[in-house]
Image: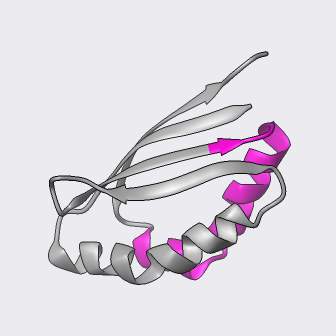
Amino acid sequence: MIRLSGRLVCMTEEERAAVLLHRPAHVLATRAEPGCISFTIDDTDDPLIFDVSETFRDRAAFDAHQSRTRDSAWFAATRHILRDFRVEELRD
């Protein structure tokens, strides 16, 4: 399994607005991807910071997700927002 965890850190209200606008469709599309086990983008106590957690069955599913998002409205709207992520490969 591949697990990504971390934070999406907005610097402005405009960046936050982009996350809020595009988050629902991005979450739905990601959860529908083959190999997606879980995917969340959660609010935190700080309105400019979002917790991100995602788990994929294997590296191929994770890589396919990364490729899909590069061509998405989500990425076009949020690509400049700071991502503080850690990716782990979990072995059984």
Residue 86 horizontal/vertical position (percent)? 48, 33
Where does residue 7 sit, x and y in percent of width and height?
35, 47
Asked if residue 31 lies in the magenta stretch, the reply is no
Q: In the figure, residue 46 lies in which quadrant? A: bottom left
Magenta residues, dominant SS class? helix
| The quadrant where residue 65 appears | bottom right
Question: How far across and how far down the image is residue 15, in percent?
Answer: 27, 74
Quarter holding the C terminus is top right
Q: Farthest residue toward the top?
A: 92
> Which residue is at a point 44% across and 79% down the rendered structure image?
77
Q: Is residue 69 above or below residue 92?
A: below
Q: Coloring scheme of the render?
A: one colour
| Magenta stretch encompasses residue 61 | yes
**Residue range corresponding to the magenta coloring:** 55-78
For the N terminus, which image quadrant? top right
Q: Is residue 73 left or right of residue 43?
A: right
Q: Residue at x 75, y 17 (%)?
A: 91
The answer to whether residue 37 is left or right of residue 61 is left
The residue at the point 67 percent across, 56 percent down is 66
In the displayed structure, does residue 66 sit left or right of residue 84? right
Percent position (x, y) of residue 83? 39, 50
Residue at left offset 61%, top offset 35%:
3
Number of marks in picture: 0
Residue 70 vs residue 18, the one in the foreground: 18
Q: Quadrant of residue 6?
A: top left
Vertical arrangement, residue 88 with respect to residue 9, above or below:
above
